[in-house]
Image: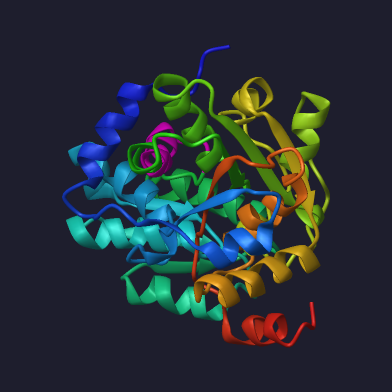
Amino acid sequence: MNWPISFDDVLRARQRIRPHLEPTPLREYPSLNDAVGSGIKVFVKHENLNPTGAFKVRNGLSAIGGLTLDERKRGVVAASTGNHGQGVAYAGRLVGVPVSICVPVGNNPEKNDAMRALGAELVEEGKDYDEAVAVADRLVKERGLRLVHSTNDKDVLAGAATLTLEILEQAPTLDAMVIAVGGGSQVVGAMTVARKLMPALKVYAVQAEGAAASHDSWLAKQPVEVAAVNTFAEGLATRRSYELTLPAMIEGLAGFVKVSDAELAEAMRTLVRTTHTLVEGAGAAGLAGLMKLRDSLAGKSVAIILSGANIDTPTLRRVLNKEL
């Protein structure tokens, strides 16, 4: 297959991002190692410390930085449940590019407020993320906007890959990574960098049971679409796989696991207790997946990515009260 992005694409993305974004910390917590067990050394990449609380700001900066002058003048549109939209809005605000974000009706109100605060126009339409994508596609035709898709965009994938580039510079003896998948930008970015710098590194993916289209597509080795999603982790709530990432996941992943909402919530509580770090459901998926994989990764050094930190107050209360 033709790999969707090259290592040179990643280096160019880092050049676009570097003036605006500091590298995020990679930390080890002995109490988290104890909680995971099996002699695993866990390295935590703190993407939750980015300006928007998520790795998606890398994607936004990479994509906006790669626009032509004409595209900047016309403006961009994206579909998001929050973190991608914040990343694109943050980048647009930095360089003066108009940004419109399509969100589903009833989307997380705190994430909506954050996108508006960054200067984005919000278009609230559709029942879920996938219907919001269709709205964004319509606005491309109606207004001549440039679409910045959260997955099917090479500059977005290259931006996501920069976080793994940092990880491998910070932990050059790593054995594996366990990475959340919504559309797959993080995991394909990780495999792109690993192929060049650390071919022995094993990359595992994890997805919510209630939104398992990418997992099921990977298993079937062909696209699978589900009629609806059911998870509180909105960052993972996609109903289909994507043509730019699925073939790479089929070719390159060492494994792919599903986790329940209860397991995501438990991972969130574990992170609060052991690292005093707040993440949303999607941000805790790496740890939830690692718990599922710990027997096969016993004694290894494993990186997980905490992204993002944008959980709304009612959901946080339910998680901490063990109501999920």
Q: Is residue 50 above or below residue 209?
A: below
Seen at 68% across and 84% down, the residue is 320
Tell me: 267 left or right of 272.
right
Q: Is residue 80 above or below residue 297?
A: below
Query: What percent of the width, then of the height, locates residue 190?
Result: 49, 35
Q: Picture quarter containing residue 179? A: top right
Q: Nearer the viewer, residue 106 or 313?
A: 313
Q: Nearer the viewer, residue 247 or 163?
A: 163
Q: Is residue 139 visible?
A: yes
Q: Main secondary structure of the magenta part?
A: helix
In which quadrant is the N terminus drawn? top right
Q: Picture quarter containing residue 6? A: top left
**Span shown in magenta:** 151-164
Query: What percent of the width, then of the height, locates residue 279?
Result: 54, 69
Query: What percent of the width, then of the height, locates residue 156?
Result: 41, 40
Q: Picture quarter containing residue 210? A: bottom right
Tell me: 141 left or right of 270.
left
Q: Nearer the viewer, residue 46 or 317?
A: 46
Q: Residue furthest top?
A: 1
In which quadrant is the C terminus drawn? bottom right
Seen at 29% across and 36% down, the residue is 13
Q: Is residue 257 above or below residue 77?
A: above
Query: What percent of the width, then of the height, locates residue 244?
Result: 56, 29
Seen at 39% across and 24% down, the residue is 197
The answer to whether residue 161 is magenta is yes
Q: Is residue 51 above or below residue 236?
A: below
Q: Is residue 145 visible?
A: no
Tell me: 80 left or right of 89.
right
The answer to whether residue 207 is magenta is no
